[in-house]
């Protein structure tokens, strides 16, 4: 048990868990971390007005409307789009997200694999294998391959740093200016064209907000260098799917490695599944690690109880 547990100052908070199919796992972990709290899942009997904290992942519609005494809402993921889009979201309750919580390492692994897929021509060799074609291609120099990371937050910054460590030439783009060792940084929409124009492999690590929805469309994707590749493990809504398909089919883009889609699970008839230039994974880039997450949540409950600002507080104006 960590020192933070011993110092817990919130004696008997009432906590509700609605975590899609994982309520019981979260409940067990939270009970172990906060043994004095009263922790229920959405399927148990509880009085909604007595709930202090809601821990949510894809909560049922209308649930938030019934929780009139909430002190905070915790997203059980890094993204908060599923919470902020709820029509019944109360206006003045703080929304908190998980920061890293074991996800950064996994995002790094996912993006290293995907970037090397393109650097080392595994997309081309996969298509060749289907035709028993033994043609060899020159091996590209990693230092000449420019990786652009959109979003330099808890996950994007870790991905960008890992890319520099294996030798890619890395730049990053964010809303406000960032300084990260070894990375050329850009900020704001006025720099987007310049940033895109020098990204041979574009990684999207943005949150879904009204500003980022559809940011990768015909216009912006055309600003990537010819033969560029895209990796998106953030949210499907950042890409206009029809525009991506068109730019792949016209040959401007070389390929796409996609962990997310506008509709998930990706429908069986979706053109992404069997497109020769697209690799699909089923939203597995980074799973929330429960142990790290319950620590973060418990520490935040402590902070709130002490009247301090919690970690991972979402700005409702920017949407992340
Ligand atoms: P953060 O909130 O820590 O970082 C977001 C970054 O995006 C920041 O650098 C921010 O800029 C930048 N950003 C936000 N809006 C804009 C904008 N309009 N223009 C330019 N930059 C912008 O998020 P995380 O790194 O923790 O997570 C990113 C996303 O990854 C999550 O929101 C989630 O959707 C997705 N995700 C996907 C998973 C998967 O398994 N597929 C798992 C976990 C997360 P600034 O630094 O200036 O604030
Ligand atoms: C998240 C996710 O946002 O898993 O954490 O997508």
Image (cartoon, rainbow, N blue to C red):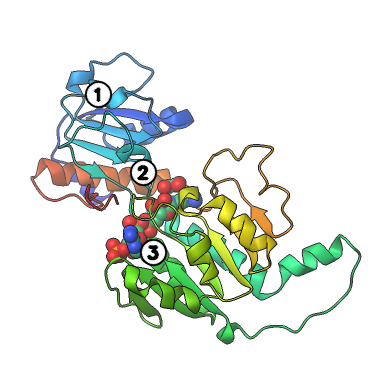
**Alpha carbon of mark 3 to alpha carbon of mark 1: how far?**
32 Å
Q: Residues within 10 Å of mark 2 (few under 14, many from 20)?
A: some
**Residue 159 horizontal side relative to residue 109, left or right:** left
**Residue 200 horizontal side relative to residue 294, left or right:** right
Q: Position of residue 130 (x, y in %)?
A: 86, 60
Cβ–Cβ under 8 Å for marks 3 and 2: no
Residue at the spot x=37%, y=39% of the render?
82
Q: Secondary structure at mark 3?
A: loop
Q: Which residue is mark 1?
A: 65
**Alpha carbon of mark 1 to alpha carbon of mark 2: how far?**
17 Å
Foreground pick, 301 / 283? 283
Q: Which residue is mark 2?
A: 81
Q: Secondary structure at mark 1?
A: helix
Which mark is first along the chain, 2 or 1?
1
Which mark is first along the chain, 2 or 3?
2
For the question of whether residue 162 can be seen, the reply is no
Q: Does mark 2 have its CB less than 8 Å from ligand 1?
A: yes
């Amino acid at each position: 048990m960590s020192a933070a547990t011993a110092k817990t100052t919130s004696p008997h908070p009432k906590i509700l868990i609605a975590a899609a199919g994982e309520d019981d796992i979260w409940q067990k972990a939270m009970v172990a971390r906060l043994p004095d709290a009263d922790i229920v899942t959405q399927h148990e009997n509880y009085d909604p007005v007595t709930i202090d904290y809601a821990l949510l992942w894809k909560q049922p519609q209308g649930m938030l409307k019934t929780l009139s005494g909430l002190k905070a809402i915790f997203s059980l993921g890094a993204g908060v789009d599923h919470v902020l889009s709820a029509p019944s979201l109360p206006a003045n309750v703080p929304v908190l997200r998980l920061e890293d919580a074991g996800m950064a390492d996994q995002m790094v692994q996912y993006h290293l694999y995907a970037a090397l897929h393109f650097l080392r021509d595994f997309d081309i060799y996969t298509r060749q294998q289907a035709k028993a074609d033994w043609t060899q291609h020159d091996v590209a120099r990693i230092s000449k391959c420019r990786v652009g990371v959109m979003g330099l937050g808890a996950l994007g910054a870790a991905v960008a740093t890992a890319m520099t460590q294996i030798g890619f030439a890395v730049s990053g783009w964010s809303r406000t200016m960032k300084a990260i060792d070894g990375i050329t940084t850009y900020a704001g929409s006025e720099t987007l064209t310049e940033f895109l124009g020098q990204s041979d492999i574009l990684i999207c690590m943005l949150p879904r907000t009204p500003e980022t929805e559809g940011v990768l469309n015909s216009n912006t994707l055309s600003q990537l260098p010819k033969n560029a590749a895209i990796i998106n493990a953030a949210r499907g809504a950042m890409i206009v799917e029809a525009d991506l398909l068109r730019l792949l089919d016209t040959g401007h883009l070389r390929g796409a490695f996609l962990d997310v889609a506008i509709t998930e699970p990706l429908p069986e008839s979706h053109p992404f599944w069997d497109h020769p230039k697209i690799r699909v994974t089923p939203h597995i880039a980074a799973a929330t690690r429960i142990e790290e997450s319950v620590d973060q949540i418990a520490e935040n409950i402590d902070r709130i109880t002490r009247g301090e600002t919690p970690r991972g507080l979402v700005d409702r104006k920017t949407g992340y």
